[in-house]
Image (tube, helix red, strand yellow):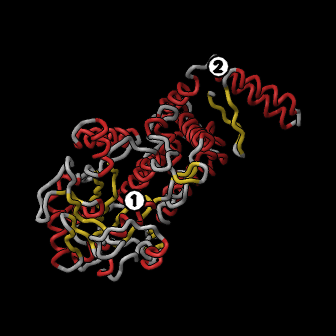
Amino acid sequence: MALRVYNTLSGSKEEFVPLTPGKVGMYVCGVTVYDNCHIGHARAGVVFDMIYRYLGAKGFEVNYVRNYTDIDDKIINRANREGVPYNVISERYIHEFDVDMARLFMLLPTHQPKATEHIGEIIGLIERLIERGFAYQAGNDVNFSVDKYESYLKLSKRNLEDMQAGARIEVDERKQHPMDFALWKGSKPGEPFWESPWGQGRPGWHIECSAMSMKYLGETFDIHGGGKDLVFPHHENEMAQTEAATGKPFVKYWIHNGFVNINAEKMSKSLGNFFTIKEVLERYDAEVLRFFLLSAHYRSPIDFSDQNLNDAEAGLERIYKALAGVDERLAGSEDPSRTEECAELEEKCQALAARFSEAMDDDFNTALALGHVFDLVRAINKCLPHAPKALLTQVQVEVAKVAKVVGVLDSKPAEFLERIKARKTEGMDIPIEEIERLIAERAEARKAKDFKKSDQIRDELLAKNIVLLDSAQGTTWQVK
């Protein structure tokens, strides 16, 4: 099966055929570095890291570019509040972003350009747009003329007239059209600036990505990615200005990940309903967070909650317990001959690579791909005492292939389980064995419809700050 990807531009899945055989150019919008990142940023990072890994596993040579927006109104405002130069803020949060990404097992992109290091390329691109009649100077600003570019809004599938009629647009008499956007902004007193043919100023948000992507990937490249919220206006404006300047298609495949939601609302700093990556990693293992973010299809929204994080932890723990059992068996001296009880494990092991690839080739379906790992785990648990060492060694090999792509399951099982145990028992005054015994006793009480006893056990554990979480998969627990 050939790799098929969902292209936002066409609104459908398409076979992935790179412009140059065997090579892929991929640009992903990074972050504006004025604060710590939230897990909405983590999802975009994890999704495109997974895509980067999978394309590499399929034999492509990937040139992966992810930028830093290191000059912006938000950066300037924070610098003014703290009374420091803008680059003190940007460098601080570039460092914090890099730390967060490393903790989530991200591979380093091929290039990580900063907007402020590409002012020359940005000015050159704006000059091309002016020469071709797609941009105009307004004071010390330069704006892109949206009505000169006939294909404007082809990515987001919006209607320019409807948007103008339905939106409250701030009146700017210097604009030829209310939807025109800034390519260059004249600097205000006290703001950082760079010299340009239009006076002192700084680049607009959208133009930086066009300039940097073309520098490292050329005027047309394979994949442009980012969060769904970037489709409009950022990616729409990128496409318009770049194609207007070059007269060529900008990007072949546009890929966008879905939102992280809290109570059915997109997590974002503007809404104030966000958790930073650092806050989440104080309470959950980094591998659990990454596993959670890959547990749904990348284009689907994913709901952030303690219940869902605990479910992800329980699922990952289940996989690692099976792999720990494999390690223990391989460390032992006994090596039973193959029995009929191992036929299912042998079949699941031999088929894992093909089934995993089939799922991933269908628009990077990590949810289905990880489901095949759980099928393998069930087979391991059924026949572990009878499995020959050669088969168990092959299980380790196949799981390692999956781990290389998804960026989880790469820890030593015993070490991961010890980390989870330490997190769960921090500040507790009751042994895990006692918790598990009481949960099993409660399960029997519920099965016998003895709800009084079931409630008593729940209350007993709650009194010791242990909260039980019931789901279709069973009961998990967390410290209150």
The residue sitting at 13% across, 61% down in the picture is 199
Tell me where residue 420 appears, x and y as whole percent. Answer: 54, 30
CB-based contact (under 8 Å), mark 1 and mark 2: no
* Secondary element type, mark 2: loop
Please, is residue 186 above or below residue 341 in the view?
below
**Count of numbered labels shown in the rendering:** 2
At label 2, the amino acid type is Pro
Question: CA–CA distance between discs 1 and 2?
Answer: 44 Å
Q: Is residue 224 left or right of residue 384?
A: left
Q: Which mark is residue 226?
A: 1
Which corner quadrant of the image does residue 228 belong to? bottom left
Q: Is residue 374 left or right of residue 444?
A: left
At label 1, the amino acid type is Gly
- Reading the image, the residue beneath label 2 is 431
Please, is residue 436 above or below residue 360 in the view?
above
Q: Could one spot residue 414 in this view of the protein?
A: yes
The residue sitting at 66% across, 46% down in the picture is 341
- Residue mark closest to the camera, 1 vs 2: 1
Name the residue furthest top: 429
* Secondary element type, mark 1: strand
Tell me where residue 124 appears, x and y as whole percent. Answer: 14, 67
Which corner quadrant of the image does residue 129 belong to? bottom left
The residue sitting at 82% across, 33% down in the picture is 444
Tell me where residue 403 appears, x and y as whole percent. Answer: 44, 47
Q: Is residue 257 left or right of residue 245?
A: right
- Mark 1 vs 2, N-terminal side: 1
The one of 36 and 23 positioned closer to us in this rendering: 36
The one of 296 and 185 positioned closer to us in this rendering: 185
